Amino acid sequence: MKNSKIFWLLGLVLVLGMFLAACGGEEATEEEVVDEEEVVEEEPVEGEEEVVAEVPEELDEPQVLELIESAEIPTLDSSLVTDSVGFNLLNNVNEGLYRLNEENIAVPAVAAGEPEVSEDGLTYTFEIREDAVWSNGTPVTANDFVFAWQRAIDPATGSSYGPYMFSGVIDNATEIAAGELEPSELGVTAVDDSTLEVQLERPVPYFESLMAFGTFYPLNEEFVTAAGDDYATNSENLLYNGPFVLTNWDGTGLSWSLEKNPEYWDAEAVNLEEINYDVVKETSTAVNLYQSGEKDRTALSGEFAMQYASDPELVSELEPTLFYLKFNQERNGEPTPLANENIREAIAMAFNKEDLATVILANGSLPADYLVPTDFAFNAEGEDFRDINGDLLGYDPEAALEAWETGLEELGVEEITLELLGGDTELSKKMDEYLKQQLETTLPGLTLELREVPFSVRLEADEAQDYDIQFAGWGPDYQDPMTFVDLFVTDGPNNKMSYSNPEFDALVESAKNELALDPEARWAAMAEAERILLEDAAIAPVYQRGLMSLQKPYVHNIVSHPFGGDYSYKWAYIDGAE
Amino acid sequence: MLKYIAKRLIYMLITLYLIATATFFLMKILPGSPIAAASKLSPEQEAIVLAKYGLDKPLPVQYFEYITGLLQGDLGVSINQFMGVEVTTLLLDRIGPSFQIGAQAMILGTFIGILLGMIAALRQNSWIDYSSTFAAILGISIPSFVFAAGLQYWFGMKFGWFPVALWDDGFMSSVLPTIALAMSPLAVAARFIRTEMIEVLSSDYITLARAKGASRSEVAFKHAFRNALIPLVTVLGPLAVAILTGSLVIEKIFAIPGIGEQFVKAITVNDFAVIMGTTLFFSAFLIFIILVVDILYGIIDPRIRLSGGKD
């Protein structure tokens, strides 16, 4: 018997060891760097035609929406939120100076109106609405913003998004994040209770839209301080100033609710009385709950998207998230074959994106021949940024073969073996296989070795530039082409592929600085930068992600957003339910 | 007996310490960062966040601090899944549903399994025996998620007898997951009881008992069943741990807030304190079950002496 016990224990330790090693660091919940299958766990969306539907005078009773969420809430502390579930809820229970409206334009929310902006674009003065109050009845003041922002940038808070969003935008943020200055030196001041002055490090043309982002939301100092470590660990230890308040959240559970916030300054615009959430991680279960009438919406992934492709309750949305191949030009201090522009160009043009998007993904994704997504950023006249450059670096097998042969000749080789670094999810593997088949067929002499790893391992490999080609993705941090274009400046933190083009860098730099106050020239500079990037074939765009969902026909006016919180329920209502 | 249990408890603590140590170092070699948004941070900022959680210290220091905290009952806090939530709170919140479904499944599965096994053994080579064996083979060979999906579709969706999923309808919410989870202990129990009983029924002392005029039920329950129980208890011990501590698949399919699914998620996102806390909880439970099994041996068959015959 003693032996059997020893075996049990040894077995346990061994099994745990193998389990830990095998499961190590899979897909992290990330907002910007995105994994290919992250979409399947996102919440569903509304039909486009519904976005600005007129609200009928008489609505159904009760106004209750039943939703499915993809994961638990890690925290609702706006300084600490990093995941899509958290940002989505924050967007519905809290509010910043601005909010994205039904047309995804940032409009004043807690701010009483448009700010006063200094001529150099560096100083913004906001007036706070008199009727903006917290759910405990205390007014939202300018100091609530000062407190929240200083807290988010304070290294002691351990905020991930604070330094990321503030640095290079708010004055002194970079130095405070690095521990060189005190948080009190951040460029934000409460002139009085209702006047907030913000000092920027450089003119930021998209600053208003940043104000709609969760990290910039206010926090009631008295409440947060009194709650201490318990702050934001459950629905009781939170204060709300948005359309809804969170209830029945115990901090770790799989269900919670939102209830209409009667204290919200624009409560009249809110129709829904209640939103009930349940976390369901299995798509088949979510679909069953939807079909049985217990839930009003569900996202569809993989085979479910195909199965329900012609369902009248199917709604689809194009997200501003782009997936592309990163070509690493230097690995272990040595140039890779991808340092050759013809080789990069050949690979970028050698695979059929249309088939990949429609057959393999089959979820509304679009083949992409661009960096900045379509239907994402618009100028003052409402023109899509995408219209300037149109399509670049598209599928062209003949041109690809020509470039390939030239590239091989330039390198003096007849065969090249490259490693494709991708995700370990089922969908990632399918796409990798497809790319391998396409590229090896179109480009004779190419061998593509697949390396499929968990998301966090991919991030590590990216950081160490330990790959040849990487299947990568990016979703926006703010509503401006710069969030994509800025990724590839020389030695940029997200470049990690040794791409460098001084002309490209200069254009990005000018768009950030001297052209910051000249929207037209700035727009043109970013478009030119995008064109150069793709002419250099620094990356190969693959697809822009789509999302398919089922939604009951009686659900209206749920607004989806390109960044920050994914959805707004402020304007949603139920009408026509039996 | 008390001396034996005290001795076993000391061994348990030593074992737990060794498991904690092994898991701690295994966990540290996991690839990836425990910080959810590490990709957005500069190395300096990442260092500041790591320092906040004490993850910047040398490994021996981290180990010493962890073991010290452990001795004081502090399992630490979740880093990125439930920021700031204590692991003990998380375990307490999550173990309830897992334990309820697991316990129900063990009881249901073992009871029906024993019944099927006994009937099969007593009616060897009859259609009842074949049916029982067929049920056992199905229970072992078909994965629980297949049962779960089938039960959810038919009894949840089609007939509407039970909730499709979610944990908000009291006992009714637990019925389908319990049945799905019970298939494994059912199959194991049926197989073991049948095999052991057939062997016992053909032994000399059963022939003697029959010759002495013992009734059929007396032979079956008093002699055969009791002896067949020992190997069953041996197998059901670890199975009970696996089932009571949560099933990843069943919890995910029925959207149950259990510990099994939580544990796997913790590993995938490098939530160190949660990985450690859950592992130690599982280990302590397993060791406890081993002790219970050993004690049960003595109860089932008094000839088995717990302390090697010295008490």
Image (tube, coloured by chain):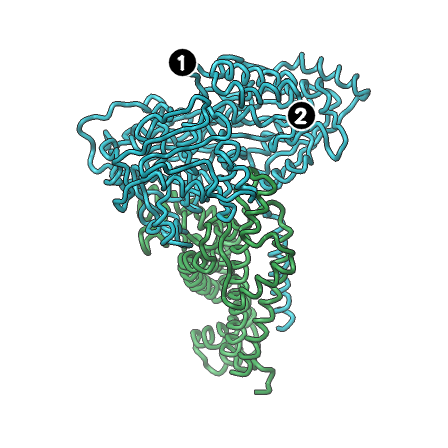
Q: Which residue is mark 1?
A: A381
Residue A426 can be seen in this image: yes
Query: Relative to residue A190, is residue B140 drawn left or right?
Result: right
Residue at 48 percent across and 53 percent down: it is B247
User: Chain ID for label 2?
Assistant: A
Which disc number belongs to residue A499?
Answer: 2
Q: Which chain is green?
A: B
Q: Quadrant of the C terminus of chain A?
A: top left
Residue B197 seen in the current view: no
Q: The residue tagged with tag 1: helix, strand or loop?
A: loop
Label 2 SS: loop
Task: Identify residue type, mark 2.
Answer: Tyr
Task: Compute the Cα span from label 2 to label 1.
Answer: 34 Å
Residue type for callout 1: Glu
Q: Are marks 2 and 1 on the same chain?
A: yes
Chain A hue? Answer: cyan
Task: Note whether A343 is above or below A82 in the view shown.
Answer: above
